[in-house]
Amino acid sequence: MIDASIAADLVNRAESLGIAILGMDGFLVDDDSDAVYPSLARLSDYSRTIESDRDQFVRRTCADARATLQEWSTPPVAGYHMQGEARGRHMLAIVLDD
């Protein structure tokens, strides 16, 4: 998992290296209790049918990930598709495909 604030940098770097983004999941992570709270409203899958051109696939998945990151710029809200006691840092799990 990475901090949501640097996720766009990871997507940009992945695209520059020819690595596709297959999906992302959003979480809150409480450092005090080591609790991880997944947000069911923050699940994205970009692995639909792969274009015949690898470069096109990489560009599309990275563009889709960037659009999602704009929508997810604020942390998920406890109680909205996640546990009511959720709190902590806004983190993302990003699935890559090279």
Image (cartoon, rainbow, N blue to C red):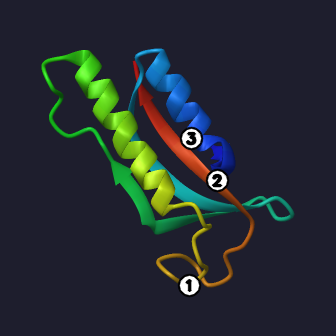
- CA gap, disc 2 to disc 1? 17 Å
Query: Looking at this view, is 83 or 2 the one in front?
Result: 2
Residue at (49, 52) in percent of width and height: 69
Of helix, strand and loop, which one carries label 2?
strand
**Apparent side of residue 92 relative to residue 64 in the rendered image (left or right):** right
**Apparent side of residue 29 relative to residue 92 in the rendered image (left or right):** right
Amino acid type, callout 1: Gly
The quarter of the image holding the N terminus is top right
Of helix, strand and loop, which one carries label 3?
helix
Q: Nearer the viewer, mark 1 or mark 3?
A: 3
Residue at (61, 84) in percent of width and height: 84
Amino acid type, callout 3: Ala
Using the image, tell me which numbered label, if any, was put on residue 91.
2
Residue under circle 3?
8
Residue under circle 1?
79
Residue 31 screen position, x and y as percent: 82, 59
Residue at (37, 53) in percent of width and height: 44
Instruction: Please say if 89 is above or below 57.
Output: below
Using the image, tell me which numbered label, if any, was put on residue 2.
none
Residue 87 screen position, x and y as percent: 72, 73
Query: Looking at this view, is 33 or 13 the one in front?
Result: 13
Q: Residues within 10 Å of mark 1 (few under 14, many from 20)?
A: few
The quarter of the image holding the C terminus is top left
Which numbered disc, 3 or 2, marks the residue that appears first in the sequence? 3
Q: Residues within 10 Å of mark 3 (few under 14, many from 20)?
A: some
Of helix, strand and loop, which one carries label 1?
loop
Residue 50 screen position, x and y as percent: 18, 29
- CA gap, disc 1 to disc 3? 26 Å
